[in-house]
Image: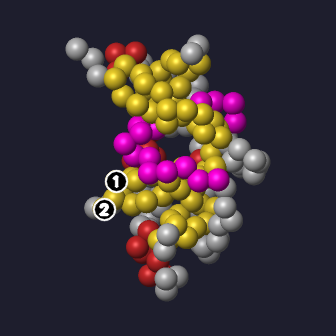
Amino acid sequence: MSNTNQYLTFKLDNEIFGVTISKVREVLDFIKTTKVPQTPDYMIGVINLRGNVVPVVDMKCKFNISVTEKTINTCIIIMEIDFKTETTIIGILADSVQEVIEINESEIEPAPKIGTRIKTEFIKGIGKHNDNFVIILDIDKIFASEGDLNFTSSEISSELNI
């Protein structure tokens, strides 16, 4: 018996990506960010979310696709990721949010080992929905590598004296 999982889908360029819905807290319209000095290029800044400092990452820049151009559909997906020894809240910038879909685990195939723009260890697999491929991301692994987001939200808050 296979499990069916729910994924929030979003677009980066013309590709559809999905993250497990259990990691998603909310979706915000794009709001102005505050740039933090000496952070990676893909970290566009931080936002104040109900009194909490939340780092925002441009996923297109992180995946070396391009830099996200702000449009009416640009949004920030607020997610919980397991980072270091704690759960950290992070915002990911996307061109647009699509929908919440269900995909049966048996219908998810492993990521190809060549020909993808991003490292395949970040990809849980590739599913299909309405004749479109959905690249299902392991959001925790995207930021788990050495040197990536080498800070937590609480560390940023204390650094900025917030």
Q: Is residue 61 above or below residue 90?
A: above
Determine the image quadrant of residue 34.
Answer: bottom right
The residue drawn where x is 49% and y is 74% is 51
- At label 1, counting other C-alpha atoms closer than 10 Å, the crowd grade (few under 14, some 14-19, many 20 or more) is some
Q: Position of residue 104 (x, y in %)?
A: 37, 19
Q: CA distance from mark 2 to mark 1?
A: 6 Å
Name which residue type carries label 1: Asp
Q: Give me the disc on residue 114.
A: none
Q: Which residues are magenta?
A: 13-29
Q: Indicate the quadrant containing the N terminus: top left, top right, bottom left or bottom right.
A: top left
Amino acid under label 2? Glu
Disc 1 marks which residue? 82
| Vertical comparison of 138 with 88: above or below | above
Which percent across, then down, holds residue 106? 34, 16
Which residue is nearer to you in this view: 78 or 126? 78
Q: Residue at x 59, y 47 (%)?
A: 59
Between 84 and 129, the one nearer to me in the picture? 129
For the point 57% across and 59% down, the residue is 56
> In the rendered image, which residue does mark 2 sit on?
86
